Amino acid sequence: MAAIPMALFIAPFYMGDMGLSVAAVGTILMLTRLSDVVTDPIIGQLSDRTRSPIGRRKPWIFLGVPLLLVSVWMLFVPRGEVTNTYFALWLVLLWLGWTFIAIPFYSWGAEMSPRYHERTRIASFRTAAGLTGTLIAILVPLITDWGFNYGHEVSESLRVVAICATVAMVIALPLLWQVPEGVPIETKRIPIMEGLRVMWRNGPFKRLMFGFTLAALGPAVGGPLYILFVVHVLEANVNSNMVLLVFYVANFMGVVLWNYVAQHVGKRKAWLMGMATAIIAQPGYWFLGPGDLYWMMIVFFLLGLGIGSFSAIPAAMKADVVDLDRLRSGEDRTGLFFSVWSLANKMVVAFAAGFALNLLAFFDFEAKFGANGPDQIMALRVVFVFLPIVFYVSAFAMMWNYPISEERHKRLIGMLERKRARRAMSEQAAAL
């Protein structure tokens, strides 16, 4: 629930309502993610090696929840004087809380099944659950605006979402406590630097990470510019949550669609088809102008359908490359792999937001409606429409020859099982 307002509304809110400059907000969004360079690998490594009565992933999630919620409230409902320092501090703490939650959570999902297609189903259900939260974050402010005349302004929507996120976490924690985590795989441990060298030699992992990073740059660039495009190009009301609702309903449908396609043609082909859909839909924005909010819904629907392939399928593919690493390194390092992946994703979001907003600032773009001339509006149109296409096409080319198919993964699992059997026999012989 909190992720979408962070991606779409926080930048315009702090530039408009809070009075921070476009360049300052863009730079802070970019620089505050640098702390994740340190925290993400540490939490990934620690969660891999944690042993506790409730498992190795759950303790970190329980630690992260209060930090995340406090940071959400301080960012969404600012207290006192709001400065660049205030904005930066609470962003760093929010990302730290999210690191505590997300890396163990996604690693846990990857460990639930060794089967190729079942991993896709697990990742799809998880993504669908996340999109349900997104839809709630969009729908509830619409409902409160309709019923109580509260939620129309961005500041009001952010407060409503903060309340919803808090209620959801309070409900989720006792449910999470009941979920069995399973017995961790006991493997040998190798030094972290040696392990990172093994990870870097994992060609499929590198290709998958770079492909996902390039694909994610597209929506990451568009996110902080969405409100600006609606206000300055379409000249529509800033509270255009109905358009967002169309996008995320299509996104939800895309998750279901590409999961079905992946079961029949494989994960790589399904993801390529989703990227192709996004590449075809994105140029539709160029033809929009004042009053074309409903035409934007059509573009948004097609784009949301394509981007529905960007989360669940790559997440399922990540679990496959971890199997290759387990075979080569001898250690179960799911958390470390997901921390590196998470770090890359966060750097993408930070870079995209910072780069896009600073690029607009270079052309003297102002967030205030009516303060921009034709050149500034054209700069916004070009960056919003064409920059994501460059990233989508690059990701498509990167993933064209991705090597791990269902057949190769079956061979990997077979080699892992034989390796475990040999280790068990050696341990039995040593005991005798």
Image (cartoon, helix red, strand yellow):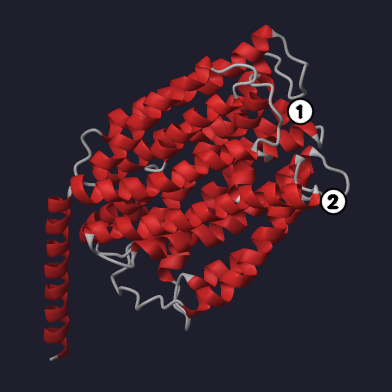
Q: Give the residue drawn at x 50%, y 58%.
A: 102
Residue 338 appears at what percent x and percent y? 41, 54
Above or below: residue 229 compared with residue 303: above
Q: Which mark is residue 21?
A: 1
Q: Which mark is residue 79?
A: 2
Above or below: residue 246 compared with residue 429: above
**Residue 120 appears in which quarter of the rendering?**
bottom left
Q: Give the residue drawn at x 51%, y 73%.
A: 176
Looking at the rendered structure, the kind of residue marked 1 is Ser
User: Which SS class for mark 1?
Assistant: loop
Residue extending furthest toward the right: 80
Q: Is residue 18 left or right of residue 32?
A: right
**Residue 186 appears in which quarter of the rendering?**
bottom left
Crowding near the residue tagged with mark 1, few <14, some 14–19, many ≥20 C-alpha atoms within 10 Å: some
In the depicted view, which residue is nearer to us: 88 or 153? 153
Q: Is residue 396 left or right of residue 218?
A: left
Q: Is residue 366 left or right of residue 423?
A: right
**Residue 189 appears in which quarter of the rendering?**
bottom left
Looking at the rendered structure, the kind of residue marked 2 is Arg
Above or below: residue 430 compared with residue 1: below
Residue extending furthest toward the top: 374
